[in-house]
Image (tube, rainbow, N blue to C red):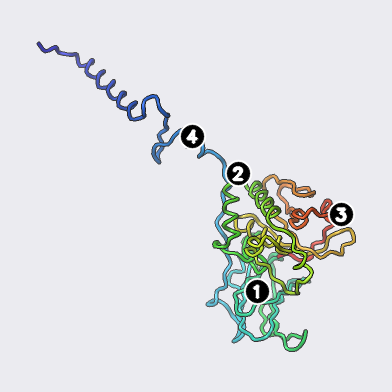
C-alpha cells in the first residue's frame, strides 16, 4: 500500500538532499572554502590575497625618435619628448663629440658615444635649455657642430629621474631590472623595496680599487655589467641603484660632488624620493616627503664615518 506524504514533507526532503550534496561537494569535514566571483578559493589562498605588496608603477622608458629629430648630416637631436624630462642625440661623426647643455648659469658636458642613440636628462627643471654638439678639431679644441634651444615644461619634477639616461642605461630586458622585479615582489611598500635594493647592492658589489686607479675621463657606467661582475667604483654603485629604483617607480638622482671634512674627494652617490615614511640607511637621517641621500659605495665597503657623517660633509655639484 502506498503512503502519501504531505507536500511539506517532500519539500523538506528535497532541501535536506540539496544540503547533503553541497556538503559532499565541499568534501564534508575537509577544508572550508569561500566563493568569489573569480571562482572557489581556499581560506589560505584568500588570506594570501590580502597581503600587501608594493604596486610597481608603469615602466617609464626613454627612446631616440629619428623621425622627429633635427640636425645635419653628422648629428641629429631629438627634443620631441622634453615634457618627459629627456632628449636624445645620435651622431655619425668620425671625430670625438661632446654634448653641452646650458640652462641659466649651469653647464653640463657629456662625452657622446658615436653611432649609438644617447639619452640625456633635462634635470634642471622647467625653462629654456640650449644644447650644443661640439666636434673635436685638434687636441682639446672643439668647434660647434650643431646648436638648438628648447623651452621645457616637465609633466612633473620627477620625470628626469624616473627614466633611463646615459648614466643609468637600462630597459625592461636588463638583468638589473629583472632582479629589481624580484626585489619588488618581496616588498610590502616602496620603502621596503628601497631597502631590498640597498641590501642587494651592498651585499653583492665590491669596490674595484684597480679600476678606480686607472679610470679614464668620460667613463660611462653599465648597470648590468656592475651587477653581473659584482665589482665597480662609486659611479657604478650609483648607476646600478638608480636603474633598479627608477625602473620600479622610485625617483632617483645620480649625484656627483665632493665629500669629506676637507671636501677633497670627488665622488658619486644617489638621492631618492618617496612620500612615505622613510628608512634610515648608513648614518643619514631620512625625512618623509624629501629627497634623501643614499651612498652605497661607502655603505657596502664600511667607510670611515668621517666621509659619511650626517650628510653635512657632502657637496652636490651635478645631478643626472
| Image: 153 above or below 73 | above
Between marks 2 and 3 in the image, the one whose residue lies nearer the viewer:
3
Residue 44 is tagged as 4
Q: Quadrant of residue 3?
A: top left
**Label 1 secondary element:** strand
Measure how far apart labels 2 and 3 are at the Cα level: 34 Å
| Image: 140 above or below 217 | below
The spot of residue 55 in percent (x, y) is 56, 49
Q: Is residue 73 visible?
A: yes
Q: Which residue is mark 1?
A: 150
**Label 2 secondary element:** loop
Q: Which residue is mark 3?
A: 306
Q: Looking at the image, which is closer to me, 227 or 74?
A: 227
- Sequence-first disc among 4 and 2: 4
- Sequence-first disc among 4 and 1: 4
Measure how far apart labels 3 and 1 are at the Cα level: 42 Å
**Residue name at image x 83 percent, y 60 percent:** 259
Crowd around label 3: few <14 · some 14–19 · many ≥20 (10 Å): few
Q: Which residue is mark 2?
A: 188
The spot of residue 63 in percent (x, y) is 57, 69
Amino acid at each position: 500500500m502506498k503512503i502519501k506524504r504531505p507536500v511539506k514533507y517532500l519539500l523538506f526532503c528535497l532541501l535536506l538532499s540539496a544540503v547533503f550534496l553541497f556538503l559532499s561537494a565541499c568534501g564534508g569535514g575537509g577544508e572550508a572554502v569561500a566563493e568569489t566571483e573569480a571562482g572557489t578559493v581556499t581560506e589560505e589562498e584568500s588570506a594570501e590575497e590580502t597581503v600587501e605588496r608594493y604596486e610597481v608603477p608603469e615602466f617609464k622608458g626613454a627612446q631616440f625618435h629619428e623621425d622627429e629629430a633635427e640636425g645635419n648630416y653628422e648629428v641629429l637631436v631629438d627634443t620631441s619628448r622634453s615634457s618627459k624630462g629627456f632628449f636624445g642625440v645620435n651622431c655619425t661623426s668620425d671625430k670625438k663629440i661632446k654634448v653641452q647643455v646650458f640652462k641659466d648659469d649651469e653647464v653640463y658636458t657629456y662625452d657622446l658615444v658615436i653611432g649609438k642613440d644617447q639619452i640625456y636628462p633635462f634635470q634642471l627643471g622647467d625653462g629654456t635649455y640650449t644644447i650644443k654638439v661640439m666636434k673635436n678639431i685638434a687636441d682639446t679644441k672643439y668647434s660647434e657642430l650643431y646648436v638648438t634651444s628648447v623651452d621645457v615644461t616637465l609633466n612633473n619634477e620627477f620625470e628626469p629621474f624616473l627614466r633611463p639616461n646615459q648614466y643609468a642605461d637600462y630597459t625592461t630586458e636588463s638583468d638589473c631590472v629583472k632582479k629589481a622585479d624580484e626585489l619588488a615582489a618581496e616588498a610590502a611598500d616602496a620603502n621596503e623595496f628601497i631597502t631590498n635594493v640597498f641590501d642587494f647592492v651592498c651585499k653583492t658589489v665590491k669596490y674595484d680599487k684597480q679600476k678606480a686607479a686607472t679610470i679614464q675621463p668620460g667613463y660611462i657606467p653599465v648597470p648590468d655589467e656592475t651587477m653581473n661582475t659584482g665589482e665597480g667604483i662609486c659611479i657604478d654603485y650609483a648607476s646600478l641603484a638608480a636603474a633598479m629604483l627608477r625602473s620600479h617607480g622610485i625617483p632617483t638622482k645620480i649625484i656627483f660632488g665632493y665629500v669629506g671634512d676637507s671636501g677633497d674627494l670627488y665622488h658619486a652617490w644617489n638621492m631618492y624620493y618617496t612620500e612615505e615614511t622613510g628608512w634610515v640607511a648608513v648614518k643619514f637621517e631620512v625625512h618623509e616627503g624629501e629627497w634623501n641621500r643614499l651612498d652605497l659605495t661607502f655603505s657596502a665597503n664600511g667607510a670611515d664615518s668621517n666621509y659619511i657623517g650626517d650628510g653635512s660633509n657632502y657637496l652636490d655639484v651635478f645631478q643626472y
